[in-house]
Amino acid sequence: MTNEPTEPTATKRDFIREMVAHDLAEGYCEVPITRFPPEPNGYLHIGHAKAICLDFGLAQEYKHLGARCHLRFDDTNPCKEDVEFVNSIQEDIKWLGFDWGDHLYFASDIFQFYYDCAIHLIENGLAYVDLQDRETMRALRGNVTTPGTDSPYRDTTPAENIELFTAMKEGKYPEGAAVLRAKIDMASSNMNMRDPVIYRISYDSHHNTGTQWCIYPMYDFAHPLEDAYEHITHSLCTLEFENHRPLYDWAIENCPVPAKPKQREFSRLNITYTVMSKRKLRQMVEDKLVAGWDDPRMPTLCGMRRRGYPAAAIVEFCQGVGITKFNGNTDVARLENSVRSQLNTNAERRMAVLAPLKLVLSNVPEDFEEEISVAINPEKPELGHRQVKLTRELFIEKEDFMVTPPNKKYKRLSPGACVRLRGGYCIIATDYDLDDEGNVTELRAEIIPDTIGNPAPEGIKCKAAIHWVSSKYGVPAELRLYDRLFGDEAPDANPEGFLASMNKDSLTIITDAIVEPSLAAVAPEFLCQFERTGYFVADRYDHSPEKPVFNRSVGLRDSWSKMNKS
Ligand code: ATP
Ligand code: MG
């Protein structure tokens, strides 16, 4: 006998992980099997990532026992679904680093199974066809304080019900004219148990089964059956399904299923300054308020990927948020901090000038050129250095020079002041040209010899290093600077609707930036820190050596919380 540990490898225990450990110890199951069941009607968002990290994470933690997580497309709804979403969902889960192996399922593959279960219920007097119209049925359901009233169809015989249900299946009724209801308890304090509808008619074409079926199982009926069919042990979902659990258990109890899965609920992820509902995200895409599902400002996984958020940062964030039963609102700064801390240790450094000002080194010859060695990542000295060419004419940031500095705290360039060119010489600003409006158009400075790797000479204060790019070798680039898509902490709570909370300045495009030449050659999705300005990623689709395009993933510091504090 092998002495395999039954303890999961992750140390952080939440109530779900406690339950799974307990269920293994008690023999409820030998191997945990979970599933992630997206409905293919939109792209995955960061909320889904939380569920993915739990479902697939558990399977990883019990890998030694043979645990697994199924990817199941919950596609029992005919009209809204699309192969575009089926493909993107798989791509996004893989990108996060998870794998379903051979366990890819489509709920629509087992329409026959749900149907057989429905027949079984009818035969056992546990389901009936109701021919009342929708309004009457709704009225008879009662409300939280009033019990429901039995439908006149409730006591139809199984034989009659089989006939009616068959007629439904054969397309003899128009949509809405007949439904199949579970016969449970019209007086239940749980509204979901008051003879819920479990099958309805729809003549929409289904992406998988076309027009083969015109009756479709409701989510609450199909979901437990799918879980049982796949031998799922722990069906984990969000809290809004807690009230549906008795119906889940009822279906498992009363249908001829091969396994007895259990449903447990945890709180949804909500994030400040963000909307998460697929319906709302779709609306923004359809109304062209964003460039698409993968617009880098979107909370979708493909949007975050395009924004340059590393998958590892998203996983770390989801793990950090934890699994609880309390619905809260997580500060978006927490996600941004996960991104920043991932990038700070891993991203290479490069130099790029966002708002170029020409700087001439007036005490070197016209054809001056020198290879300067700059650290690839000061946090990781083992990565070594890269060579950057210093020439007589450079670009620096406009904001790194001021004719009249505001105060003594200003450490950058001004006439007579000294700074270091990152990795290179100390320089002293000598003079400058102005245009008619008083803007500086060109700056001249002198290098101080022998200051590469050495401090400035005695008596010269050189307190800052600024980034620079050779004007001879630098490459023009487009930079896209993103800010939060919503200006309100809780856009969903805006009485004028969430769209009224949109931040009009969430995208700034800089078309005349200059970047160091190595950046033209990088592959799409190359991520780096532009020294002093933020973390940038080469756009996944638009970047090319001929036209470099970079998206700002996140700033170097949390500028929002700083703003809110001041
Ligand atoms: P939305 O409300 O955004 O449209 P949904 O719940 O309808 O999402 P599904 O495709 O049905 O989307 O979700 C698949 C799984 O992801 C479900 O198990 C659901 O509970 C989970 N999930 C969806 N949104 C969140 C969230 N914000 N936090 C955690 N889990 C979520
Ligand atoms: Mg759903």
Image (cartoon, helix red, strand yellow):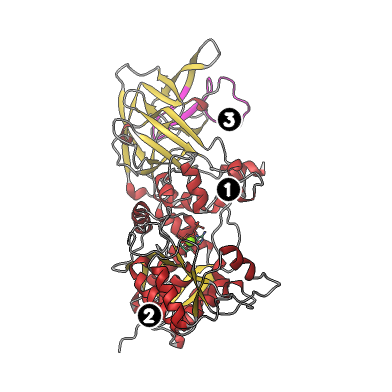
Residue 536's x, y, as percent? 42, 41
The amino acid type, in three-letter code, at marker 3 is Tyr
For marks 2 and 1, give the CA distance: 40 Å
Q: Secondary structure at mark 1?
A: loop
Q: Mark 1 or mark 3: which comes first in sequence?
A: 1
Q: Which residue is mark 2?
A: 31
Q: Which residue is mark 3?
A: 410
Nearer to the camera, 537 or 508 = 508
Residue kind at label 1, given as amino acid type: Tyr
User: Which residues fall within the magenta stretch?
Assistant: 403-428
Residue 33 in the image: state x and y as whole percent.
39, 75
Dot 1 and dot 3 residues touching (CB under 8 Å)? no
Quick one: label 2 or label 3, which is nearer the N terminus?
Answer: 2
Q: Does residue 173 lie above or below 89 as drawn? A: below
Whether residues under marks 2 and 1 lie with C-beta atoms below 8 angstroms apart, the answer is no
Question: Are there few (<14), some (14-19), or many (20+) residues within 10 Å of tag 3?
Answer: some
Secondary structure beneath disc 2?
A: loop
Residue 408 on image: x %, y %: 62, 29
- Looking at this rendering, what residue extends furthest in the top direction? 436
Which label sits in the foreground, 1 or 3?
Answer: 1
* Up-down relation of residue 131 to residue 274 (above or below): below
Pointer 2 and pointer 3: residues touching (CB < 8 Å)? no
Residue 79 visible in the current orientation:
yes
- Main SS of residues in magenta: loop
Residue at (39, 24) in percent of width and height: 394
Most distant residue in the bottom direction:
1
Q: Residue at x 47, y 16 (%)?
A: 441
Q: Nearer the viewer, mark 2 or mark 3?
A: 2
